[in-house]
Amino acid sequence: MAHPAIAEAAVIGIRHPKWDERPIVVAIKKPGAEVTKEELLKFYEGKIAKWWMPDDVVFVAELPHTATGKLSKLTLRQKFTDYRLPGT
């Protein structure tokens, strides 16, 4: 969420045929902001370990929250259960 074009984001694990699970970013862009998947992934270079680098970025209009206002990663994982990473 440190990227200036991102309003809110979450990272979840997605099934991967070789590694069992790999991370993806699910993010909301700030109003009027433009950022591509490639730009966002480039932003992470040097900030996180290479093996933590997300395999994909999915932009959404909203993220699910719990009753207390926290991000609901459980709901996100359920929503992306059938998601397939590019190239798999």
Image (cartoon, grey):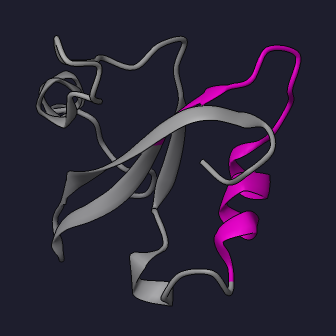
Q: Is residue 75 left or right of residue 63?
A: left
Vertical comparison of 47 with 2: above or below: below
Question: Residue 45 appears in which quarter of the rendering?
Answer: bottom right
Vertical comparison of 69 with 72: above or below: above
Vertical comparison of 56 with 71: above or below: below
Q: Is residue 45 left or right of residue 77?
A: right
* Residue 22: percent from left, percent from top: 28, 64
Vertical comparison of 34 with 11: above or below: above
Q: Residue at x 16, y 11 (%)?
A: 67
* Residue 10: percent from left, percent from top: 40, 42
Q: Is residue 87 left or right of residue 79?
A: right
In what quadrant of the picture does the C terminus appear?
A: bottom left
Q: Residue at x 49, y 52 (%)?
A: 56
Q: Is residue 4 left or right of residue 23?
A: right
Give yes or no for residue 32 being in the magenta stretch. Answer: yes
* Residue 43: percent from left, percent from top: 74, 66
Q: Residue at x 54, y 32 (%)?
A: 8
Task: Work out whether residue 34 or residue 6 is closer to the camera in this orientation and state it.
Answer: 6
Task: Work out whether residue 42 or residue 30 is closer to the camera in this orientation and state it.
Answer: 30
| Residue stretch in magenta | 26-45
Give yes or no for residue 81 being in the magenta stretch. Answer: no
Q: Residue at x 50, y 87 (%)?
A: 50
